[in-house]
Amino acid sequence: IICDIDYIMKISYMGTGYVGQVSGAVSAHYGHDVVLVDIDKKKVESINQGKPTIFEKDLDEMMEDLVINKKKLRATLDTHQAVLDTEASFICVGTPDRGGMIDLSYIQNVSKSIGKALKDKKQFHLVIVKSTVVPGTTINTVKPIIEEFSGKKAGVDFGIAMNPEFLREGLAVSDNIDPDNIVIGTQDEKSQKMLKEIYAWAAKEKYTFVNVTAAEAIKYAQNSFLAMKITFANEWGNYCDVMGIDAKEVLDAIGADRRISPMFLRNGPGYGGSCFPKDVNAIVHSGQINHSPFRILEEVVATNNKQYLSLIDLAKSKIGSIARRKVGILGLSFKPDTDDTRESPALKIISYLVSQGCNIKAYCPQGTEMAKKWLTDNRITEIFYANSAEECVKDVEFVLIPTDWPEFRELLPKITVPTFVGHRSFVNPDNFENVYSLGFPKK
Ligand code: NAD
């Protein structure tokens, strides 16, 4: 149920990555006047031409319409002016992993800029943390920095709130247009009222009202639960291999139980992406330093860190030594329908194969550019990037498919060399002579 908004708010989004671009565009789609702020000139220029800088289904048309036709969305490099021009600012900058903890430098920098701008502002302004930050960060880091640089008081001159983001890359636009849950973490009534105005388009039963620290915790509880669920499926996949059981039959059957649900219950070569690995690490660390360890999540991290090797082991079990072989890798992004290759099992697999002297050809429908950058930064340069999936599987000795892009399915009948698939749910290996998958005990 979508409701109309009564009040068109002027809103800025600080940080124009996956989260800022999508949630900013969706706010504008529902009628608010939105400005996206970034320190990256190329992103700002591209958005002002109506072009997203990320690959997300439906975002191209939406952004072009909002920027060029409706003039509801624009981008700027000027944080100061954006704060003065708007009533609320979402913080959407990155919080990358630094040795198991989150790097707060981007959060600190943007909080300083917001604080300095608020010094010059007379009206109340709401600051909402949307980035994923460990419980306590908004109150202990963001709030004092803004208070120091603005000379103003939170809850009186400006509001402080936390509204975690739950989008799934690849489905980010539809997840934002019709979210399951909108978590509104606030400390004062005025901030809560403003957030209700921002999300006035959503059905009221979608709201969860909590305090700021609980909002931060909800994001970690959710992501760590999903990472744990994937890891559970992966370990069942490994076990089924050994026991001669088809893992898909087991996982599909338990997924049919509504208490369990089939979502995130497919075995594969490990979870990746910019969120699960860093979020589970960060909450494990927070548990340790606060003397309340998450033993189960510590195991999830350890298990996932080696799960990518299961695909290599599967190949070894069928073709013997893989050293110095010619290998085709189909799929580099951490999952289909995204260009994001951060923490992708495919890149861990490539690093391992290169260390074994393999000769690699790689192809991904969207992830090649980001993968190339990461691999080059890690001094892995001897990769041939194919222009098509067909080219990638030519003149190689075996093929690995760590990421299950649906379009690779059509190619399977044409591949003549042994092919090893990470996700059992992607294909039934029994339909092909030369195809093997994790979680499927083919003799
Ligand atoms: P990202 O790296 O794609 O984008 C961050 C952007 O912030 C970059 O464009 C960067 O240039 C910009 N930036 C850095 N410092 C800035 C500053 N001082 N002022 C303005 N812009 C600045 O990150 P992302 O994937 O969008 O994630 C952002 C946050 O949201 C992270 O905390 C992440 O954990 C969380 N999150 C991400 C997802 C996801 O699927 N990507 C989902 C939910 C939550």
Image: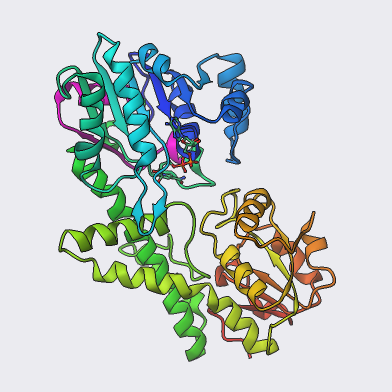
Q: Is residue 224 visible?
A: yes
**What residue range appears in magenta?**
175-199
Q: Which quarter of the picture shows residue 328?
A: bottom right
Camera-side residue of 306 and 28: 306
Q: Horizontally, is 18 left or right of 46 in the view?
A: left
- Near-viewer residue (405 or 304): 304
Quadrant of the image where one finds ligand 1: top left
Q: Nearer the viewer, residue 383 or 130?
A: 383
Name the residue furthest top.
122
Q: Residue at x 22, y 25 (%)?
A: 148
Estimate the x, y position of residue 73 in percent, counting from the top left: 51, 19
- Residue 305 in picture, x, y percent from top left: 45, 70
Q: Is residue 9 left or right of residue 36?
A: left
Where does the image place residue 257, in percent across and percent down from the top left?
35, 67
Toward the viewer: 389 or 395? Answer: 395
Number of disc labels: 0
Q: Is residue 185 magenta?
A: yes
